[in-house]
Image: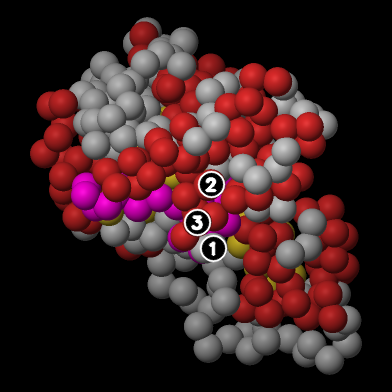
Amino acid sequence: MANQDRLAQLALNFIPGIGHMLVKQLVSYCGSAEAVFKTPKSKLLKIPGIGALTAESISKDIPMQKAEAELTKCENEGVQILIHTDKAFPKRLNHINDAPSLLYYKGVADLNASKIVSIVGTRKATAYGKEITENIIEHLAPHNPIIVSGLAYGIDIQAHKSALKYNLPTIGVLASGVNVIYPAIHRDTANKMIEHGALISENPLGAKPDAPKFPARNRIIAGMADAIIVVEAAVKGGALITAEIANSYNKDVFAVPGNVNSEFSLGCNNLIRSNKAHLINSGKDIEYIMNWEANNPQAGSKLPDLSELNEDELAIVNALVEHVDGMMIDNLSWKTSFSVSQLASILLNLEFKGLVISLPGKKFKLAINK
């Protein structure tokens, strides 16, 4: 993407009253972000969702000026801006309808790592909740997953600290700008995360956290992971919002059961009772349900005969060869460029032929001949 178009993409986010979905719609209609600012107001008004005030704002120089200033600040603070079409942008997010059109990123973590786990819970974590969080992360460590959370008090910060303890990359998704650490007491941990993971946000530099930003932040925590774990949660709260969002994205949600008399176990127990989360007692349960195999027992196995496959089937098999522990159907869709509905049909045929097996969590892998 040319520098001028990247600047225009950033500028679109400084237009008052415009959201990420409308940003993508504008770019789609006009052909590029740069073209949006060159499109006459009369044509902009024909785009669904664009009213007179928005069209007027696009025609002014203010959004571009703000974008230029923002880009300078990012360069000074070592912050990258990832556009949703960039290779480094989290591909898992591009499969959800309300994904951000860009992210601010500071750190070293691969946002498209093969295994990403989000861990959330109450800000008022108990000793039990903190202990089980660390135990889960310790057990998952051989798989080298990225641990994602929200840098909040309680379970969130415990997840980040435990990840660092076991040398796992960890990502904090902020409801503020990436240069505004909230709560400030977590600044030291945040600095370590930048060196061994990352901080990301959809909010511009300097943005303060406010109430509407937290549920928006939660959708990123849910959308960029393969598995979402709720350790402790009250009947209402951000952790349950994240779980609900994750379910709407067809993600695998896990919950740790707790004492029925504990306020901060009620949310997890309700998720399990209503079949909105898998019950887990340890990281071993996640390993089993997600079919993660630390020792890669399929190494050196022989592939089945592929001579009878058509072009579409072969493309899917070739994609699965690179992922011996299987792929989520959304990730497979992105990698092969087939729609999910097309994939479902082709995968079913491959299952009938004994070449592919389905796994829990909408994952598929090759059926290897031993």
* Residue type, mark 2 in image: Gln
SS of the residue under disc 2: helix
Query: Which mark is on residue 109?
Result: none
SS of the residue under disc 3: helix
Q: Residues within 10 Å of mark 1 (few under 14, many from 20)?
A: few
Asked whether disc 1 touches disc 2, contact meaning CB atoms under 8 Å apart, the reply is yes
Q: Quadrant of residue 359?
A: bottom right
Residue 313 is left or right of residue 2, and the answer is: right
* Residue type, mark 3 in image: Gln
The magenta stretch is 74-95
Q: Residue at image x 53%, y 88%?
A: 300
Residue 96 is left or right of residue 305, and the answer is: left
- Report the quarter where the C terminus lies: bottom right
SS of the residue under disc 1: loop
* Nearer the observer, 157 or 135: 157
Mark closest to the chain's N terminus, 2 or 3: 3
Q: Which residue is mark 2?
A: 9
Figure coloring: secondary structure
Residue 317 is left or right of residue 345, and the answer is: left
Q: Which residue is mark 3?
A: 4
Q: Which residue is mark 1?
A: 1
In x, y percent, where is residue 169? 29, 54
In x, y percent, where is residue 312? 83, 75
Q: Nearer the viewer, mark 2 or mark 3?
A: 3
Kindly tell me whether residue 282 is visible in this rendering: no
Q: CA distance from mark 3 to mark 1?
A: 8 Å
Mark closest to the chain's N terminus, 1 or 2: 1
- Report the quarter where the N terminus lies: bottom right
* Nearer the observer, 350 or 43: 43
In x, y percent, where is residue 118? 42, 41
Q: Residue at image x 66%, y 50%?
A: 35
